[in-house]
Image (cartoon, rainbow, N blue to C red):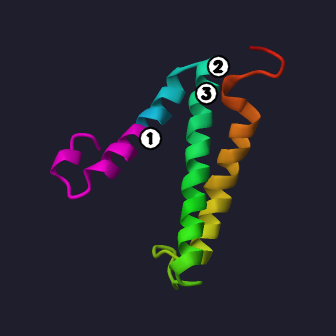
């Protein structure tokens, strides 16, 4: 993604997605507190993106697009259920690597 970014019309999105993929890879090779922190960042990002998607579709999107490939309120809610809720659930459980009562 980072190699393709300079030649694209929207390089920022390529860089952001590349960084997201690198965070996933980092989670795979770290352990303990570091893994929980990076995993929490990923979970929070998924929650925020899915919440933004739902908001954008409620504000200006169709209720049903007739396709799972096109944006709609129904598709955004399914995305929120599939990615947003598990993302925030993990983030709240892992607490960015901070254990209760420890600092």
Q: Residue at x 54, y 55 (%)?
A: 49
Q: CA distance from mark 2 to mark 3?
A: 6 Å
- The magenta region covers 1-19
Q: Residues within 10 Å of mark 3 (few under 14, many from 20)?
A: many
Q: Residue at x 62, y 76 (%)?
A: 74
Residue 53: % across, % down:
54, 65
Say whether marks 2 and 3 touch (CB < 8 Å).
yes
Say whether marks 1 and 3 touch (CB < 8 Å).
no
Residue 28's place in the image compared with 91, above or below, is: above
Q: Residues within 10 Å of mark 2 (few under 14, many from 20)?
A: some
Instruction: Considering the whole magenta stretch, tell me its main secondary structure.
Output: helix
Residue 18: % across, % down:
36, 41
- Dot 1 or dot 3, earlier in sequence: 1
Mark 1 secondary-structure assignment: helix
Residue 39: % across, % down:
60, 33
Q: CA distance from mark 1 to mark 3?
A: 14 Å
> Which corner quadrant of the image does residue 97 belong to?
top right
Mark 3 secondary-structure assignment: helix
Residue 26: % across, % down:
48, 27
> Which corner quadrant of the image does residue 80 belong to?
bottom right
Q: Residue furthest left?
A: 7
Residue matched to label 3: 37
Mark 2 secondary-structure assignment: helix
Q: Disc number at residue 33?
A: 2
Q: Disc number at residue 20?
A: 1
């Amino acid at each position: 993604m980072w190699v393709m970014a300079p030649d694209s019309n929207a390089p920022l999105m390529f860089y952001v997605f590349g960084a997201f993929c690198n965070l996933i890879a980092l989670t795979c090779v770290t352990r303990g507190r570091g893994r929980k922190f990076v995993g929490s960042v990923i979970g929070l990002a998924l929650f925020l993106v899915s919440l933004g998607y739902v908001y954008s579709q409620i504000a200006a999107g169709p209720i049903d697009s007739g396709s799972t490939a096109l944006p709609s309120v129904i598709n955004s809610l399914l995305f929120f259920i599939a990615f947003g809720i598990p993302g925030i659930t993990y983030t709240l459980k892992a607490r960015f690597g901070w254990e209760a009562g420890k600092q």
